[in-house]
Each structure stands twice: as C-alpha cells, then as structure tokens.
Amino acid sequence: MRKWKIITEGAPAAIGPYSQAIRAGDLIFVSGQLPIDPDTGGMISETGRATRRIFANIEAVLLAGDSSMSDIVKLTVYLTDLGDFEEVNGVFNEFFTSEPPARETVQVAGLPKGSRLEISAVAVARGEGRQ
C-alpha cells in the first residue's frame, strides 16, 4: 500500500517530528489538532471556540488530502477536563448533524502547549490521490 504525507498551510504546522496527516490507500489519518489559529499561531482557550478551531484545522487538512468533514469515520477527543464534555458535544452536533462518526473521548493529564483539547481524525479519501 502506498502512503504519503499531507501538508497544508490552512492548519498549524506539526509541532514535533510527525506529519499533519498521512494518506494510506483510501484512508487519511489526521494527527491530533490543537486549537491553534494557523494565521496567528495563537491558542484558543474557550472550549466551544477551541473545538470549532480544531474542526477548521481538520477540515483544511482533509481538503488538502481530497476529503472532507463528511468523510470522517472516526474521531478521538482528548480533554484535560471531562467537565468540558457537554460543550464539546454541542459543537459536534453543529458539524455532524446526520451519521456522526465513531468516536471516543478520554481525559488526559496534559496536552501539548497547555491546550485543554485535542482531536484526531480518520477519514475516507475521495479521489485517487497523488500518483
């Protein structure tokens, strides 16, 4: 199976030795996204706005890989406080109105750059991709 990395300026650059996403066959594996605005580099802290920013980052990566938010099949949500769970769910309901993807949410002790929230995704790619 062929695989290659997906890179876009529409989402924050990786902050470590990893790719924004990898396409392997017909699947795209999006690395965990933080609520960082790619234009300013600023971190968004308010949970609802942070979740929306993360989804905008995920969408930019997916579009660069010939996919979209509607093609997501699996999400993993990392929270430093499960008390934010309901607010995150409220934003999920804005983005996934029918056939929401599979998902798990876990509470973690800490996240990079002091973020309270990180989300990774797996999506199906639409086209043939890079030759």
Image (tube, grey):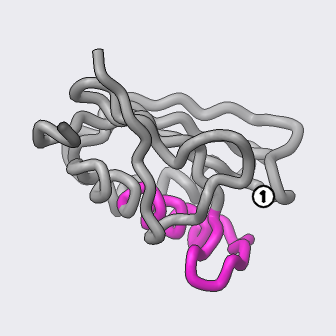
Which residue is labeled 1 in the image? 115
Which residue is painted at 46% across and 42% down in the image? Answer: 21
**Residue 125 vertical placement versus 48 (above, below):** above
Q: Is mark 1 on a helix, strand or loop?
A: loop
Q: Is residue 102 left or right of residue 37?
A: left
Name the foreground residue: 66 vs 96.
Answer: 66
Direction left: furthest residue:
127
Q: Is residue 18 left or right of residue 127?
A: right
Residue 125: horizontal and vertical position, in percent? Answer: 21, 38
Q: Is residue 55 magenta?
A: yes
Name the foreground residue: 31 vs 46.
Answer: 31
Label 1 crowding class (10 Å Cα cut-off): few <14, some 14-19, many 20+? some
Which residue is painted at 38% across and 63% down in the image? Answer: 60
- Magenta segment: 35-59
Three-letter amino acid code of the residue under disc 1? Ser
Residue 42: horizontal and vertical position, in percent? Answer: 71, 78
Q: Quadrant of the C terminus?
A: top left
Q: Is residue 89 left or right of residue 27?
A: right
Name the foreground residue: 112 vs 9.
Answer: 9
Q: Quadrant of residue 37?
A: bottom right
Q: Does the magenta stretch include residue 25?
A: no
Q: In which quarter of the image is residue 13?
A: bottom right
Q: Is residue 96 visible?
A: no
Q: Quadrant of the N terminus?
A: top left
Residue 96: horizontal and vertical position, in percent? Answer: 30, 51
Q: In which quarter of the image is residue 22?
A: top left
Direction top: furthest residue:
1
Which residue is painted at 63% across and 40% down in the image? Answer: 18
Q: How many marks?
A: 1
Residue 61: horizontal and vertical position, in percent? Answer: 40, 55
**Residue 35 vertical placement versus 125 (above, below):** below
